[in-house]
Image (cartoon, rainbow, N blue to C red):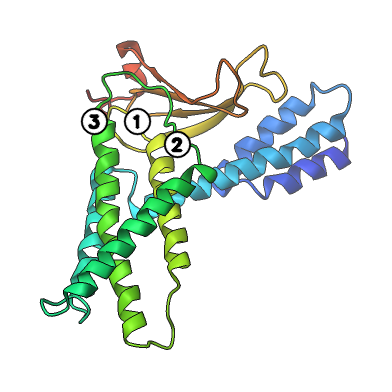
Amino acid sequence: MSIWHTGILTTASRLVPKEQRAEWLAEWRGELWHVKTDAAIFCLGSFRDAVWLRWNHQHASRYKMLRLESPAHCLFLLGALAALSLFFALRLPVITPSARDGARSARDMFLMLTSMACILLPAITNLPLGEYPRYARRRWVFLASKVGLILPSIYAACIYILYQNRSHHPFVIPPQVLLAAIILAFRWVLNDQRQRCPVCLRLLGHAAHVGQHGRNFIEWNGTELMCLRGHGLLHIPATPADWSGRQRWFDLDPSWSGLFPQKRCT
């Protein structure tokens, strides 16, 4: 192990979250001792691993800050946003008993933008949610609840845009901006659904890369997520293949319950 190789690993470790940095650096240094050739290329590969850890750590931190890891908290925040949006939007003068055409215009805009978003959504994200057991029906109820709580906020935004147009507001939000926001909102709903346990509906954690790149033909390669309550594992393939094109859920039997004391529930 040369000073040059140690310097590369030390530099890459600055990208790793602080609480994981010491263990990560010790593991890469230990593996470096077994590398006989192309040690520099091996060390440069540590940057990719460090960036992956940093990205997943920040992604999890954002969810914890908003308390979205719990399904109840997630639905509560979406419901509060929908209630506040409708509360302020329905107070605008475009929606009154004497202005029924305003309500009709807002409804037509809502239906048009929502339909266009559903048509364009497959262009930026995959619609299939993966392979899950048949008993996991509650996840469909949770998915429908999230979509149902987002729709009132979209309708409120349509009312606000209509109000801006009719009041000759100096700064008018184009409908195209709202369309992009709707697409991103639906995309978030699908991505959030893919990262949840089908049993407890909580966000999965402990992301770990399994397998090696370039060996998809002989072994599985991708990311493995674990339910923090011990219900199972989620395998997300890095490169879709004919035999592993979708993410797949694997249940953990009761013999694993010892690793999750006082957390496992049915």
Q: Position of residue 79 (x, y in %)?
A: 22, 56
The residue tagged 1 is 197
- Inspect this view and state whether residue 77 appears: no
Q: Report helix, strand or loop for mark 1.
A: loop
Tell me whether circle 3 and circle 1 mark residues in contact (CB < 8 Å). Answer: no
Pick the quarter of the image with the C terminus.
Answer: top left
In the figure, residue 36 lies in which quadrant?
top right
Q: Nearer the viewer, residue 155 or 112?
A: 112
Crowding around mark 1 (Cα neighbors within 10 Å: few <14, some 14 to 19, many 20+) is: many
Q: Position of residue 104 (x, y in %)?
A: 23, 67
Outermost residue to the left = 97
Above/below status of 164 relative to 75: below
Above/below status of 76 relative to 88: above
Query: Going from the N terminus, do you reach mark 3 or mark 1 first?
Result: 3
Q: Residue at x 29, y 54 (%)?
A: 150
Give how far apart the Cα atoms at labels 3 and 1 are.
Answer: 11 Å
Query: Going from the N terminus, do you reach mark 2 or mark 3 first?
Result: 2
- Inspect this view and state whether residue 34 appears: yes
Q: Inspect the image, locate mark 2, and give the three-letter code of the amino acid beneath it.
A: Leu
Tell me whether circle 2 and circle 3 mark residues in contact (CB < 8 Å). Answer: no
The residue tagged 3 is 138
Q: Report helix, strand or loop for mark 3.
A: helix
The residue tagged 2 is 127
In the figure, residue 108 lies in which quadrant?
bottom left
Q: Position of residue 120 (x, y in %)?
A: 48, 48
Crowding around mark 3 (Cα neighbors within 10 Å: few <14, some 14 to 19, many 20+) is: few
Pick the quarter of the image with the N terminus.
Answer: top right
Q: Report helix, strand or loop for mark 2.
A: loop
Q: Nearer the viewer, residue 165 or 54?
A: 165
Give how far apart the Cα atoms at labels 1 and 2 are.
Answer: 18 Å
Q: Residue at x 25, y 26 (%)?
A: 137
193 sits to left or right of 263: right
